[in-house]
Image (spheres, rainbow, N blue to C red):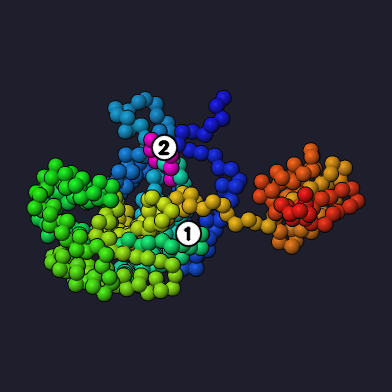
Amino acid sequence: MDNSPARGTRDLLPATVAVRDHVLARITEVYHRYGYQRIETPALEDIARLTGGQGGENEKLIFKVLRRGLTELPGSLDELADLGLRFDLTVPLTRFYGNNHAALPVPFRSFQFGPVWRAERPQKGRYRQFNQCDIDLIGEESVLAEAELIEATTEALAAAGVPGVTVRLSDRRFLSALADNAGIATEAQGGFFITLDKLDKVGWDGVRKELVSRGVAEAQVDGVQQAITALQGLEEAKLADQLTDAVPSLPENVAADLVATTQALAELAKTRELDWEFDPTLVRGMGYYTGQIFELSHPGSSSSVAGGGRYDRLIGRSLGKDVPACGFSIGFERIVDLLDSAPRVDTVAVLHEADVSPAEVLAVARQLRAEGRQVTAIKRRGKFGAQLGRLEEWGYTSFVHVKAGEVAGERVLGSRESS
């Protein structure tokens, strides 16, 4: 039989898992310091919830699960499935909060990590199963949520070995006001946002061509372009005035919220390696965002390494009343790809000859473990130097050679002493 994993999935060797464990441990440590509590949700969700309009284009990529107990085929293929594998962690969070909110603090700081599944066409860097890492702050209506999420996540990435990110910030309410100011009808604004999101890939010529094909007049496109150009590269001190000058219909509270977040970012940038900018072209694909949106970019990655925003009306679909909420998702796989390796862990191999009793081998290993060390007992075989080379490749940092009635002193792998 073919032993390859299913298309779009992969096996992970110990060295790769070590990097992933390192990244997750550092991120978890930081998020816990900020008060985020880890939760877990099932891999399976009701198919009606997964297709309820919360996941945008991802709803087309659901792996559906056949009903149990079918005695005859239903009238349509859709009726064959009642469950599906989750395609993100946000939709399960809305159900989780609706089901458990009475037992949760207010505000509630949630941390999730786990696999999600999408029926993607497999290609380099795009998998059908991958891990997501999310934090969400539910019940906080002020921009304290946005500022804290950004601060916690930039600190988490730096701790994992990815400092020097750039924060890109915008607001869905600003984008709506921009479209209104340009005279774009409300029903056409969804398509407008989708097209504007392509600006970094196709440039203004490509955006103009697509908007015109959607029925937007050339003069309207000119107005949008002029407003966006005027708002690029702004300093925090000039942001409020420039926003209202470029988009006169922008509500005052939207400008005030953006200024409050950028002030927090400016203060944060004084304490760590961090850049930020107001990016009027930032859209983000999910249709459920209701306020500020943000992404983190890094020079080593061609795509954003984290992103999120405010979604004040999403939980209301599960709970029956709107609840303020804001979330941030780390591109865990992209972060791992930016790291060559995890820091080496002090790992000792107890290398024992065949005639040494199990009791003696375990006694040596037990003594080393009592010192808080990571220890593995391995039988001596083959050429000594070749086996030491394999131990070093496998991540061991030192070894103890145990012969019958004799325990040699610990030696560091890779040093002249061990050769």
Q: Secondary structure at mark 2?
A: loop
- Residue type at numbered disc 1: Val
Q: Nearer the viewer, residue 173 or 66?
A: 173
Q: Which residue is mark 1?
A: 162
| Neighbourhood count class around disc 2 (C-alpha, 10 Å): few under 14, some 14–19, many 20 upward | few
Q: Which comes sooner in the sequence, label 1 or label 2?
A: 2
Magenta run includes residue 118: yes
Query: Residue drawn at (35%, 72%), measured in percent from left and top?
Result: 266
Distance of label 1 from label 2 (alpha carbons): 25 Å
Q: Is residue 276 above or below residue 330?
A: below
Query: Residue drawn at (51%, 53%), measured in percent from left and top?
Result: 339
Q: Nearer the viewer, residue 405 or 144?
A: 405
For the residues labelled 1 and 2, say whether their Cβ atoms are less than 8 Å apart: no
Is 375 positioned to the left or the right of 231 in the image? right
Q: Which residues are magenta?
A: 116-125
Q: Position of residue 283 (x, y in %)?
A: 27, 54
Q: Is residue 44 above or below residue 30?
A: above
Q: Which residue is mark 2?
A: 123
Is 214 positioned to the left or the right of 19 in the image? left
- Type of secondary structure dominating the magenta stretch: loop
Total marks drawn?
2
Q: Position of residue 301 (x, y in %)?
A: 41, 52
Can residue 188 be seen here? yes
